[in-house]
Amino acid sequence: MPHDLPKAYDPTAIEDHWAEYWVREKLFSQPTPKDGGPESQPSFDILLPPPNVTGNLHMGHMFEHTESDILMRWHRMRGERVLWIPGTDHAGIATQMLVERQVVSEGSTRQQMGRDAFIKRVWEWREHYGGTILSQMKRLGASVDWDREYFTMDERLSVAVREAFVKLYEQGLIYRGAYIVNWCPRCQTAISDLEVVYDEHKGHLWEIRYPVIGEDGKDTGESLTVATTRPETMLGDVAVAIHPDDERYTHLHGKKLRLPLMDREIPIITDDWVSREFGTGAVKVTPAHDPNDFALGQRHNLPSIDVMDDTAHINEQGGKYKGFERFVARKEVVADLEAQGLLAGIKDHVNNVGHCDRCKTIVEPRLSLQWFVKIQPLSDKAIAAVKEGHIKFTPEMYAKTYLNWMENIHDWCISRQLWWGHRIPAWHCSVCHKTTVSREDATKCAHCGSEKIEQSTDVLDTWFSSGLLPVSVFGWPNIAVENRADFDAFYPTSLLVTGFDILFFWVARMIMMGCWFSLDVPMADESPRSLAESVPFREVYIHALVRDANREKMSKTKGNVIDPIEIVKQYGTDAVRFTLASMASPGTDIAFNVARTEGYRAFANKIWNAARFLFMNIDRAAEVGITIDTAALGTMPIADSGAPLESRWIVAELHATADKVNEALANYRFDDAANAIYQFFWGGFCDWYLEIVKLSLDFNEGADKTRTELSLKTLVGVFEASLRLLSPFMPFLTEEVWHAVYDGKPPAKSIALTRFPQADNNAKQSDAIKKMGLLQSLIVEVRALRKEIGVEEKAAVPIELRIDEDLKATIRDSHAIVERLARVSELRFVPRISAGLARHATAQFDVAVVYERKIDVAAECEKLNKEIAKQEKNVANADRQLGNPAFTAKAPAHIVEGLKKQRDEAQHLLDKLRADRESLAC
RNA sequence: GGGCGGCUAGCUCAGUUGGUUAGAGCGCCUGCCUUACAAGCAGGAAGUCGGGGGUUCGAGUCCCUCGCUGCCCACCA
């Protein structure tokens, strides 16, 4: 029996089933369009930021997916051609590290295994464990197109990577050279600037004397003191630099120094770059181990001496320190200098130390032969795309952050000394030593024809391939006439939903690469592609971070990580989704609190029980021959003017809510949208409408059958529309209940394929809202009065009501509602409230409960006094403002009028309150 | 060293271009097992909008300043 819902809402009982159903039925697949371009149907498509293949789903993912899924389901229900593409990233370093650890635990190493065997091993690992996140996403109901799932190392995506590399190379935008890069000695690879995280570090500033030597090569007895935070790098020193205008050292210009420990002659050079204030004003120059020194070395034609190997141990260039690990070498160097009396001092010094983003090892700036992208031509386009408004950021401030970074961008080091990743399509010739870059696997040198070539062992930065995704997932570079439907329909994608942490890593790179490569792809009508049409996405929505209940960042080390799957098991996916949505206001981090989730599980339960109430009545109706025509559902209910007040009211509220939700979602205000629905369903539909409609649901003999049927129709219609309104937020619960509404014969395979409620502007403006408001305020006042004077909950009591003539009809027509909801036995209209009765006064009416009051006079007086003081203040404030000629002259008329009205109402109320106080003899 | 946020009820947060008496959820207090729901119903208390100054008829909202707090960027040895 579809109508037979269990008494309590149990999410676990329904969610697995629907999650599996959605995937099995391929409900969210969006095949390549056959009907041409996007004109035939507006499309809305986004690319899922591919999680690392090594990853587990965390709260941040769930948040991101919830927001995306809400948007996707919403757009889908608005009839658009919706596509959400899932995939995973091969995550070079992360994955290699993980598998390496596994290999080591088995007593081997990747070096022992060899490159091919190791890579095979990684692929095997990926086959077994690589789908964790995606299967978790399936369980959480993300409405992605599983038929289009990709992996960044898939063949077709690899083709795009190679094409992009070769093209940039041909355009002169990729070069190879020896520069200072960030080297991770643990990962044994270069990493980009972005992959270095800086940390304040309490260290020292060592001051070392470098003896000055004369023409004869002998010490003059004088020395120049340099300051350094990394004394071990002195082994690679090739000069000492001073500021040309530094008078302390003028006499040393042109002189030479003896490099301690290495006994090497090095020159003193002058350069404006040197700061006279820092340290001693003399800086040792180590071009192979510091970017500034490297630049100095370039300017002054100095050699570079790399004193370390790939693992940051001192190499043969470091003389007797060869073999020492860098920090051991540091100790040794300092000790030896001290022994030789060359250590002038040690000062405490706080400096920023760079760590490898992946493994936290201290990064070694190191001279190394790497591949770089000459980035400026790409960044120019990427800057223009945002400045010209082709890409819109939400929140807007991220556009500033983005531009600031983009305008100060450095060339991008794209080579990595890893095994797992896209291998660089470059072949080095051992005969002519030139490099061949090729789309096809090269067999001979393009320069000398030699076959003694070997492919570069380096792979590309992971972000090089993910940066290409917006073009590559739609088939680039193979966009031929017969093979471009996807590209035409879906590029540029509509939106990117992501976190700010990958703004530069990924978002910026996609913009650069998307604009650069798609520009060559003509439009469907063969016209050239404009910059506006070459962007990878038209909008970027940057979501906030999910923190724990104490606003702490979740981290494994702190042990405060909330596992979404655990929470979901406890409260249900829908409740967790609703929690995230309701807290998601752009730009504000989410302090995830299970108390909120508990509340939204209660909300889910509320919906569940409303459904049970509905079904109970439908079944009772069926027994007396009243049936609901489900074919009439699926639209926006409309109440005609003859319908009962509560029907017209709830329909108007439904339209108003639909309007709010649509607008909120258009502005990424998930919180406003969720709150509007919550408020409508719980505060309006359940608390008021259901209670009132119970009066009309009379199935007894002799009851007004037409009225019952009409009411039931509205009830079911509004409820069904509410489900559709809720569906993007709570897809599981609404799916279950929606199928039940249709008694197992739904008009579509899923509620996700129905239409989202759209407000009719006329329907949301209704006098019913005003009338209902009056009734509600009367009912609330009576309830409060009852409470104040201690009327038993169950007792029905008479009330006296003094109300303006023009409002009387509303009350009279709906007296049954007042009687039921406020437990009133008799409603007496009176010209004035009888003396001695407990009363409440509002601007519109006075009401009293006819009951022997058991009230605390003192408490009542206190309350009255408080209220009187408040109203006196209101009147005084209003009078003061109204008495101000500047106000009446300058403020707009409706403000002045409004204030006058407000003042009069306050005065009216005040009079009544004073009278009350009198009668109480306070 | 630059840049960007935040500070509103006990907690977590809303508050649209300045406009009439600043809101929500949770928590708290009181009373109810009223047959959809105690994961519920009803009523209630609670805020000098971080401090100071300014603009304005009018400021939570705009400007200045100070404080606290968080984040991002940056090659100072």
Image (tube, rainbow, N blue to C red):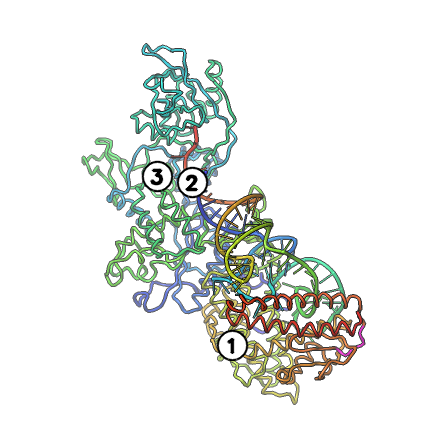
Most foreground residue, A613 or A680: A680
**Picture quadrant where residue A573 is located:** bottom right
Q: Secondary structure at mark 3?
A: strand
- Range of the magenta residues? A849-853
Looking at marks 3 and 1 on the same chain, the residue that comes earlier in the sequence is marked by 3
Provide the chain ID for the residue under circle 1.
A
Reading the image, the residue beneath label 1 is A765
- Give percent across and percent down for residue A90: 40, 46
Image height of A390 relative to A639, above or below: above
Looking at marks 1 and 2 on the same chain, the residue that comes earlier in the sequence is marked by 2
Q: Secondary structure at mark 2?
A: helix
The stretch drawn in magenta includes residue A850: yes
Image height of A385 relative to B32, above or below: above
Reading the image, the residue beneath label 2 is A195
Amino acid on which disc 1 is placed: Gln
Q: Secondary structure at mark 1?
A: loop
Residue A738 can be seen in this image:
no
Label 1 near label 3: C-beta < 8 Å? no
> Which of labels 1 and 2 is toward the front?
1
CA distance separating discs 1 and 2: 55 Å
Amino acid on which disc 3 is placed: Ser
By secondary structure, the bulk of the magenta-drawn segment is best described as loop
CA distance separating discs 3 and 1: 62 Å
Identified at 43% across, 65% down, the residue is A75
Are the numbered discs 3 and 2 placed on the same chain, yes or no?
yes
Q: Which mark is residue A783?
A: none
Q: Which mark is residue A415?
A: 3
- Give percent across and percent down for residue A758: 46, 72
